[in-house]
Amino acid sequence: MSADLTTVPGDVQGFTRAERMRQPLAGKVLEATADHHGVCIRPFMMETVDYDTGEMRYVGVPCGSTVETQCGPCARKARALRQTQCREGWHLDDEPDFTPEPPTDQQKLLVAYRADLVAEYRKALAEGAETDAEELREAIHTADADLRNLGVRGKLPNPDAPATAVRKRSTRRRQDAPNLPRRRVEKRTLGREYAGKFRPSMFLTLTLDTYGRVRRDGTPVDFATYDYRRAARDVVHFAALVDRWWQNLRRCVGWDVQYFATVEPQKRGAPHLHAALRGSIPHSVIKDVTAATYHQVWWPNHDRLLYETDRLPVWDHERRSFVDPGTRQALPTWDEAVANLDAPAHVSTFGEQVHSKGILGGTPEAGRHIGYLTKYLTKSVSEVVEQDTTRQREHADRLHTELAVTPCSPRCPIWLRYGVQPLGARSQTASAHCKGKAHRRTTLGLPGRRVLVSRKWSGKSLADHRADRKRFVAETLAAAGIEKPPQNTSRLGWQKVRPGDPGVPPRAHVLLHAISERLTWKAEYDRALLAAQPPPGGDTELSATPLAA
């Protein structure tokens, strides 16, 4: 009996090893299916407890990632939500109503009770009754929480007096910055109307200044002359510079300009701003405001490193401060270092390139600009800034090296390397290592907020927009006779799953259940849409000639 040489023993269905290795893994197929149906591919588990019945179960909660390479469905949902938020607020015709409601009797009674607690607390401190003062402090915190639950917003007075007076800097403008007209800002957010029916809005782009000539790929022509120090500091303080620009614009035009903006990196790694503005402003005013806007950083000088990573200041437990490792002299505190500054450590400004154009609402051009405005929201900084060539990687490495020694805030531990104790210094900061996003290689200093939205943009938060989408779907289903009563979650307790919990279902089972549930929802929604459409023919007269009686 001859052997069959067409199949090697151990092969599955006649496939060779190379062919089997090219077949997709079951886990990847499951993730691709979940991605296709809009199901989160990396949910984290939560344990819920029903206080009425005592039932405990595990629920997969979407991760909520905004980066598509991490979770495509969650990132695309977040981008679609931002597009809705931008569209609803860009070309409003009516002023959003933010008139605060009058305080209730319960709120006023609670504030009066809090005032008595503060008076008793300060009396206890004056008499040295620390135990009574601690109990009163806890009662004040409880009253603050009750006020928040009753709908009181804003900052409540601190029962403790500030240890030091707040230092104020002069608001006089720099002599090298052009002046701008200053008007009283009116309480309106709508721009000017033209011809009794047109109320255009704007799309603009702002960029940072140049730090040296760059090639088409974003890398410097000369690495040695490129100003990486100024580039790194501008990136760290970009958010503050943008906030100052909005303030100057409102003071210049005289009304409360509203915006929806996104921050994206250029090829050279510097951030720039794309913004949708409600209302129309002359381009000359935009350019003048940009030229006159600057941000001064009143921090200690940090041009020269005094300590290296192998010889850092050490924490003295007796003096509760950092000291020089050799001389044992205490480093100056943050308040001491900024007490007698006569010049800012850095001044950030925008570049000369300013782009702005008018956009009419409801036009295809408005839709294209909304898509462009949110184009890179699902991409990480490392995906936007290309690092394919050796020059691009070297440029990113040099910028990250400078960002690694650039303090990002007064509390940044990197201040120890410049011989200054950071604000709120304690023994845990002895490593002089900061975990902030400004120092990470993957972000290249880009601010944490990629989307900047003014408070009066659409009159809604992202949670409000999510609720609108849920309400629309529920109403569509109800119109087709599919009732989805809202679930009462007030009697549910939520907590994170403990590591190693044996009752947690496998991730594959969670994804399969979510896919099945999503398919059921989709079928119900499609059925509701078909029911909402008029039947073909129906009562609509489609004949070119009237029918005979």
Image (cartoon, rainbow, N blue to C red):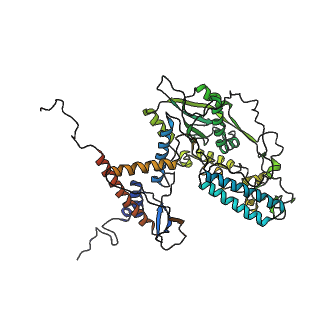
Q: Quadrant of residue 224?
A: top right
60 left or right of 6 in image: right
261 left or right of 142 in image: left
Q: Quadrant of residue 169?
A: top right
Task: Give the quarter of the figure containing the C terminus.
Answer: top left
In the rendered image, the vertical position of residue 264 relative to residue 67, given as above or below: above
Of residue 60 and residue 482, the one placed in the foreground of this image is 482
User: Where is residue 124 drawn, in percent x and y?
Assistant: 80, 61
Of residue 160 and residue 317, the one placed in the foreground of this image is 160
Task: Give the quarter of the figure containing the N terminus.
Answer: bottom left
Q: Residue at x 42, y 33 (%)?
A: 364
Q: Residue at x 85, y 57 (%)?
A: 330
540 left or right of 278 in image: left
Of residue 178 and residue 114, the one placed in the foreground of this image is 114
Question: Is residue 524 visible from the viewing direction of this image?
Answer: yes
In the current view of this chain or complex, which residue is farthest to the bottom?
1
Q: Residue at x 26, y 43 (%)?
A: 534
User: Where is residue 400 drawn, in percent x and y?
Assistant: 65, 49
Of residue 399 and residue 65, the one placed in the foreground of this image is 65
In the current view of this chain or complex, which residue is farthest to the left?
549
Q: Quadrant of residue 223?
A: top right
User: Where is residue 160 drawn, in percent x and y?
Assistant: 76, 55
In the rendered image, the vertical position of residue 236 relative to residue 18, given as above or below: above
In the current view of this chain or complex, which residue is farthest to the top?
195
**Number of numbered discs overlaid on the protein picture:** 0
Question: Is residue 210 visible from the viewing direction of this image?
Answer: no
User: Where is residue 42 drawn, in percent x and y?
Assistant: 48, 60
